[in-house]
């Protein structure tokens, strides 16, 4: 149960799953195991190997989400300053590129906020999406981050902040 709405949500997508993979038992037709003496022995099932596989299924990445359907009414009253049903905006997406849990490459797309240079009482902030890949940073767009098939298949962690 969610007791109160957080200001920040960090969603960790479970991209790795434990899977059983039967080992193939190799037998030598010339070995003693195939003699008539051993024919009455029960056959052992081949041992099972546990592997970790990556789930590369695309995930729909929404620019906004709401906890409205799962937050109890008491939490809404406690957090009324956020509005009746707090809505969250995506601020960052971390990606895992690779096929295994023990190898791969991590990249991140995030929003960089800056205040408008125009002097106004509202001090409007502008948002620019930036891609981080080791030492390389480049400008990108929300559509590229949220709607591209590659991004939807490699998204690993999503950071959302409550709307102000």
Image (spheres, grey):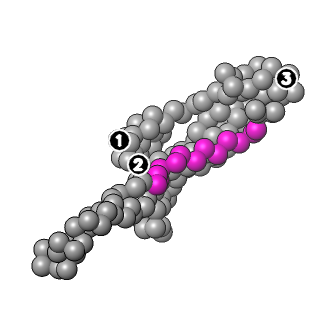
**Could you tell me which residue is drawn at 76 percent across and 32 percent down?**
1
Helix, strand, or loop for circle 3?
helix
- Calculate the distance from the C-alpha at mark 1 to the C-alpha at mark 3: 39 Å
Q: Position of residue 62 (x, y in %)?
A: 51, 32
How many C-alpha atoms fall within 10 Å of the one at disc 2: few (<14), some, or many (≥20)?
some
Q: Which residue is at a point 78% across and 27% down the rendered structure image? A: 82
Q: Main secondary structure of the magenta part?
A: strand
The answer to whether residue 26 is visible is no
Would you identify the image quadrant in which residue 80 lies?
top right
Q: Tell me: 42 left or right of 30.
A: right
Looking at this rendering, what residue extends furthest in the left direction? 30
* Image position of 74 (left or right of 62): right
In this rendering, would 33 be left or right of 62? left
Query: For the point 39% across and 40% down, which residue is it?
Result: 58
Label located before the other in sequence (1 or 3)? 3
For label 1, the SS is helix
1 or 3: mark nearer the eye = 3
Report the front residue among 18 and 127.
Answer: 18
Name which quarter of the figure residue 98 lies in. Answer: bottom left
Q: Judge left or right: residue 85 versus residue 62.
A: right
Magenta-colored span = 6-18
Q: Is residue 18 visible?
A: yes
- Residue bearing mark 3: 74
Q: Is residue 17 magenta?
A: yes
Mark 2 / mark 3, whichever is N-terminal: 2
Query: Residue under circle 2?
Result: 55
Disc 2 to disc 3: CB gap under 8 Å: no
Q: Image quadrant for the C terminus?
A: top right
Residue that appears at 22% across and 74% down: 37
């Amino acid at each position: 149960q969610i007791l109160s709405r957080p200001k920040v949500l960090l969603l960790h997508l479970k991209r790795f799953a434990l899977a059983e993979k039967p080992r193939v038992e190799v037998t030598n037709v010339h070995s003693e195991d195939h003699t008539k003496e051993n024919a009455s022995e029960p056959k052992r099932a081949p041992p099972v190997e546990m592997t970790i596989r990556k789930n590369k299924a695309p995930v729909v990445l929404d620019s906004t989400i709401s906890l409205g359907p799962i937050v109890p009414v008491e939490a809404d009253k406690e957090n009324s300053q956020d509005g009746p049903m707090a809505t969250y905006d995506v601020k960052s997406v971390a990606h895992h590129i690779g096929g295994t849990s023990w190898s791969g490459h991590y990249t991140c797309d995030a929003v960089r906020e800056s205040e408008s240079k125009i002097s106004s009482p509202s001090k409007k902030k502008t948002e620019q999406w930036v891609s981080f890949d080791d030492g390389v940073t480049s400008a990108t767009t929300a559509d590229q981050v949220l709607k591209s098939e590659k991004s939807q298949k490699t998204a690993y962690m999503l950071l959302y902040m409550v709307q102000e």
